Image: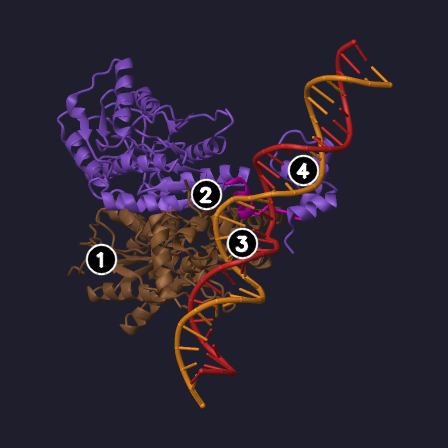
Chain colours: A purple, B brown, C red, D orange
Amino acid sequence: MKSTIHDVAKKAGVSMKTVSRVLNHEPNVATKTREKVTAVAKELHYSPSLAARGLASSKSYLIALLYDNPSPSYIANIQKGATQACRERGYHLVAEPLDVEDSNGVIDGDLSAEIERHLERLPVDGAILTPPLCDNGSVVRILQRLKIPYVPVAPISSHGNLPIVQMDDVKASKEMTQYLISLGHKKIAFIKGHPQHSATPRRFEGFREAMRKAELEIKPEYIEMGDYHFRSGIAAAENLLGLKEPPTAIFASNDDMAAGVISAANRLGLSVPKDLSVGGFDDTPLARILWPQLTTVRQPIEELGFAAAKLLMSKDSTEDSARTLEHDLIVRGSTGPRHAK
Amino acid sequence: MKSTIHDVAKKAGVSMKTVSRVLNHEPNVATKTREKVTAVAKELHYSPSLAARGLASSKSYLIALLYDNPSPSYIANIQKGATQACRERGYHLVAEPLDVEDSNGVIDGDLSAEIERHLERLPVDGAILTPPLCDNGSVVRILQRLKIPYVPVAPISSHGNLPIVQMDDVKASKEMTQYLISLGHKKIAFIKGHPQHSATPRRFEGFREAMRKAELEIKPEYIEMGDYHFRSGIAAAENLLGLKEPPTAIFASNDDMAAGVISAANRLGLSVPKDLSVGGFDDTPLARILWPQLTTVRQPIEELGFAAAKLLMSKDSTEDSARTLEHDLIVRGSTGPRHAK
DNA sequence: ATAGTATTTGACAGCGCTGTCATATCCTAT
DNA sequence: ATAGGATATGACAGCGCTGTCAAATACTAT
C-alpha cells in the first residue's frame, strides 16, 4: 500500500540514494533525473517516513513550541504561523505547554528537574520560546544544556548573539501616539502595563518620544500605572477622568485595559469617541467586540511564529529571515478628532 | 553521550529485547529483572529514540490535533488536556490548523486534495478532531481513507459506533435555567446561537426542559435568534428589553452574546443584576473581564482534550475513559434574585 | 521424579532512510 | 583526441529499536 523510496527508485530507474537526493533538494542531481524522480514520486503518492528519515539522519523534523501561560490567542497565532513555516519544509510542530511559572514567576528545583527530564525525551530539532519563557533563566539553561537550538520570541533579556524575533514596541507605540496627536489631541494620558513585562517600558518610551517630538507636555498625573488587566484600566480611567482637567485621549498600553477605560467612560456618561478617544494595543479578539470597536495596534504574532520556525529550520544556511516584524496601526471607532468644547 | 538501549542492556546484564520489554510495559518480565532494568535506565538517563522506535514498530507516537478556526481559547484548552494525556504515555501532540472551511462552510475539491496530501505525510497514530471539523464530511472521509484513527470532540453527527467525547449541553443548559428559576425569575428569555452549530438545539432544549419542568410559560417573544456573536447579543437584548413586559433574566447561549446583553442593558440604564440577570455559556476569558462578571457554564474543554487523546492511545485496550464529561455552573455577579418591582 | 505447561529471555533480522565513499559520466581546455 | 576536474550516481552499511520465533527456565500436577 504505502510506497517506499525503494519503489520510487525502481520505477524511476535510479538508485535509492538518488531519490533521496531529489527529495532533500540536494545539489548535484541532473535536471532530467530530478524531474523524473519527482514525477514518479508524485505518481506513487510517495511520502517519506519521518521515522526512518529521522533515524538515519538523526534529525527529528519536529519543532517544539514551548509556552507557559500567555493569552490563548497569542499562542494560537504563534502556532498558526509556525505550523505554516513547518509545512513548507516537511516539519511538524509539537505543542509543549510548560507550566513553569507559579504565581511569583520563580521556578523551583523539582520543577526544573522535571522539565529537563521531559525535554530530554522530546526529540526536537529546535524550540520556539515564547514569552515569558524566553526570559526564564532556568528554562533557557535547560535548553542550552540539552543543546536544543531555540529562538526566543520577543524576549526582554539579551540571548548572546542568538537570533531572536520580535516586534518594535517603541515604534508602534509612537505611531499610535502620533495618530492621536494628529487627531488634534493634546491632553493625552497613558496607562502603563505590568512593570515586569518586557513590553511595558518600550510602549511607554514610544509614547514619550512621540509626545516630545510633538512638543507636548506629559503631565505626571496623566501617567497611570496598570497591570494589563481590565480592572486596572477601569481604575486608571476613573483617576484620569476625575481630574479637574481630564485628558481628551487615553492610550492604554493593551486592549484589556483599554476595554476598562471604555467601560469606565460609559459609566461616567462620556461618549467614546466623542468625548474621549481611547487607544489600545494588541488587537485581541476583544478589540472587535467592544463598542465602539477599539483602535489598536496589531502585533505581527503569526509572523513572529513563522519567522521563528523558519530560523530554526535553516540553522545552517545563512538565510536571514527578518527578525523585527512589522506591526499595524488599526484604526477603528474608539478614536476620533478632539471635540471643541 | 546519549545512551542507547544497548548500553542499558549491557549494564543490566540482559538482552536488548528485555530492556525493550520493560520500557514498553510488556507482560512476562520477572519483577526482579524489571526493577534492575528500570534502575539502570534511570541511572543512565536513558530515553528511547522516538524515531527508531517508530521505525521498528511502525508507530509514530504522535497524535495530531486537527482544528479549523474555533476560538483560540478553545483549542488552547483542548491542547492543554491532550498534551497532558500524551505526556503520560510518551506521545507528543502535533498541532495542525486546517483552514478547511471558507465562509460558507463548504470545502472544494482542490482544498480537499491538498489536505489529503498533507495528512498523508503526517505520520500520526491518531487525530483529535475538534468542531467544526468533526462534522465536515470531506475531512472525515479523508481520515477514513487514510486509515487514521480519530476521535471527534463534541460532534453533531453520529460517527458510527466510534467513541466520541462530548459534554452534555442539554443538562448544562437546564441547570443554568433552573438556577435562574431558583432565583425567583419567571420571565426568562433565551437567545439561541447560530443554527448550524451543534450545540444550538441542545442548549435550547435544556432551557425548554427546565421551563417545562417548572411549569413556566415560554413566551415566543422571549426566544431570540442569535449567531453567537457579540453583536447579535446586543440586537436580541434590545428587542427583549423593548418589550412592554420585558424579561427579568436573559440566558444567552454563549458568553459573547451575554456580553452583548450586558452592554445593551447598561446603555439602556438597566443595572445588572439588579434589574436584569444575565447568564452566559462557555466561561470564556471574556466572562471574567465583564462587569459584572458573568454567570456562565464552564465547558470541560481541557478534559475533553485529555479524554480524546487517551482514547486514541489506548485503541487496543478496552480501557474506557469517560466519554461525556462534566461541566460546571459558574455563578458570578451577573445574576441575582428577581427584584420585586 | 517427570512430563507437560507457563513464563521468561535472547538471537536475529529488518523497519526506511541517509551518510560515506567509491565509481561513472560529463565537460572543458589543450 | 585526451587528461583532469567537476558533476552525477550508486553500493553499502547502519541509525536504534521492536517483531518473530526459538530457547531456556520456572512452575504444576501427577
**Residue that badge 1 annotates:** B331
Using the image, tell me which numbered label, if any, was put on residue A93.
2
Label 3 – label 2 distance at C-alpha: 23 Å
Disc number lying in front (3 or 2): 3
**Residue that badge 4 annotates:** A18
Would residue B193 be found to the left or right of residue A203 on screen? right
Label 2 – label 4 distance at C-alpha: 28 Å
- The chain carrying label 1 is B
| Number of other residues with Cα within 10 Å of mark 1, as a class: few under 14, some 14 to 19, many 20 or more | some
- The chain carrying label 2 is A
| Number of other residues with Cα within 10 Å of mark 2, as a class: few under 14, some 14 to 19, many 20 or more | many
Would residue B157 be found to the left or right of residue D8 on screen? left
Q: Which amino acid type is shown beneath numbered disc 4?
A: Thr
Q: Which amino acid type is shown beneath numbered disc 2?
A: Leu
Identify the residue at horizontal 30%, vertical 69% (top origin): B211
Where disc 4 sits, the SS reads helix
Q: Are marks 1 and 4 in contact (CB under 8 Å)?
A: no
In-front residue for pair B249/A193: A193
Label 2 – label 1 distance at C-alpha: 38 Å
**Residue that badge 3 annotates:** B56
Where disc 2 sits, the SS reads strand
| Number of other residues with Cα within 10 Å of mark 3, as a class: few under 14, some 14 to 19, many 20 or more | few
Identify the residue at horizontal 72%, vertical 40% (top origin): A14
Disc number lying in front (1 or 3): 3
Q: Position of residue D7 (x, y in %)?
A: 69, 26
Whichever of labels 1 and 3 marks the residue nearer the N terminus, that label is: 3
Q: Which amino acid type is shown beneath numbered disc 1?
A: Val
Where disc 3 sits, the SS reads helix
Q: Position of residue B157 (x, y in %)?
A: 49, 63
